Image (cartoon, rainbow, N blue to C red):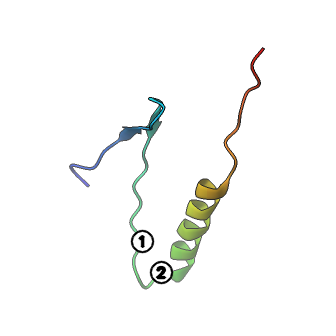
Amino acid sequence: MAGLKEEYTDMKGRRHRVEHLTVHAEDSADRERVKEELFLALTSAEKRIPAS
């Protein structure tokens, strides 16, 4: 997977590591797992550390 980004910077200037996965169309179990992980990542509340 040459040429794909290994990290990105969000709007607040924080850098995040990127993981690329490929899933074959015939493999529905892996496809469902990837969809579940993506859903959880997009909907989970950001962990916030209270200011001291």
**Which numbered circle lies on residue 7?**
none
Location of the C terminus (image quadrant) = top right
Q: Position of residue 33 (x, y in %)?
A: 58, 69
The x, y position of residue 36, in whole percent, is 61, 67
**Residue at position x 70%, y 48% in the image:** 45
Asked whether disc 2 touches disc 1, contact meaning CB atoms under 8 Å apart, the reply is yes
Binning the other alpha carbons within 10 Å of mark 1 as few (below 14), some (14 to 19) or many (20 upward) gives few
Residue under the point 51% across and 75% down:
31
In the rendered view, tell whether residue 2 sits above or below residue 17: below
Question: Can you say which quadrant of the picture contains the N terminus?
Answer: bottom left
- 39 shown above or below 13: below
Q: Quick check: 34 left or right of 20? A: right
**Which residue is labeled 1 in the image?**
23
Which residue shows up at 42% across the image and 71% down it?
23
The quadrant holding residue 46 is top right
**Closer-to-camera residue (13/1):** 13
Q: Which residue is mark 2?
A: 27
Q: Is residue 17 above or below residue 3?
A: above
Considering every residue shown, the one lying at the far top of the view is: 52
Q: Residues within 10 Å of mark 2 (few under 14, many from 20)?
A: few
Residue 41 in the image: above or below residue 39: above
